[in-house]
Image (spheres, rainbow, N blue to C red):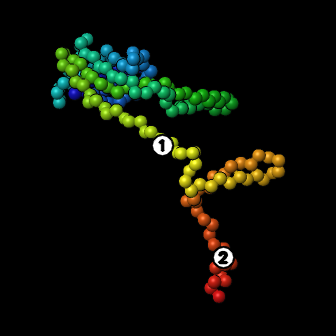
Amino acid sequence: MYAVIRAGGKQYRVAPGDVIRVETQEDKDGKVEFGDVLAVSAEAGSVLPAGSGALVTGEVVEQGRGAKILVFHYKRKKQYKKLRGHRQDYTAVRITEIAFDGQSFKAPELPKKEKKVKKAHEGGEHEGVAEVKTSKRPGKKAKKHVAHAHAKKAAPKKAAAKKKKK
């Protein structure tokens, strides 16, 4: 089951559960309706032209701006150069339902993600961590550097290794 919709001057082939990026859409409580349905496929291999009764609904997943596109105008031998940037606004929509001719095809529900809870450390100190205060200039406040117990140790010096061989 899929439908062909028109949004923002472009056509999209959508199925329930698909996430598409369309030009900025006005939403009502996070829901978007696409009334301009061009075609609907009810069965495999058959495409029916949709009348005014077809409706595609979706929920807004995200709104943002796309990657920057640089537009460079240049005319040779005329010392004319112009550089402009453009970022297109978009709305990411997850298609939830395609309704046509009394039939309704819905997308499966997504499982809700559980938020991860960070555990608080007792006393604010980490285990195996030593704070070292250093200051290179007198009269300045010393900065705190945290030295972890699992940090790498310095390699043995070569002179000590040569003495052991003799």
**Distance from Cα at disc 2 to Cα at disc 1:** 44 Å
Considering every residue shown, the one lying at the far bottom of the view is 166
Q: Which amino acid, mark 2?
A: Lys
Residue drawn at the location 57% of the way across and 45% of the way down: 123
Residue drawn at the location 67% of the way across and 83% of the way down: 163
Whether residue 49 is visible to the viewer of this picture, yes or no, is: no
Q: In this view, does 139 lie above or below 106?
A: below
Q: Which of 59 and 42 is in front in this view?
A: 59
Q: Quadrant location of the C terminus? A: bottom right
Q: For this view, does 105 lie left or right of residue 164?
A: left
Q: Nearer the viewer, residue 131 or 66?
A: 131
Q: Mark 1 points at which residue?
A: 119
Indicate the position of residue 14 as horizontal and vertical percent values. 30, 27
The local crowd at label 1, few if under 14, some if 14 to 19, many if 20 or more residues have their Cα within 10 Å, is few
Q: Is residue 77 above or below residue 58?
A: below
**Of helix, strand and loop, which one carries label 2?**
helix
The mark closer to the camera, 2 or 1, is: 1
Considering every residue shown, the one lying at the far top of the view is 52
Q: Which amino acid, mark 1?
A: Lys
Q: Quadrant location of the N terminus? A: top left
Q: Which of 117 and 165 is in front in this view?
A: 117
- Marker disc for residue 158: 2
Residue 80 occupies which quadrant of the picture?
top right
Indicate the position of residue 42 as horizontal and vertical percent values. 18, 24
Q: Is residue 153 above or below residue 20?
A: below
Whether residue 102 is visible to the viewer of this picture, yes or no, is: yes
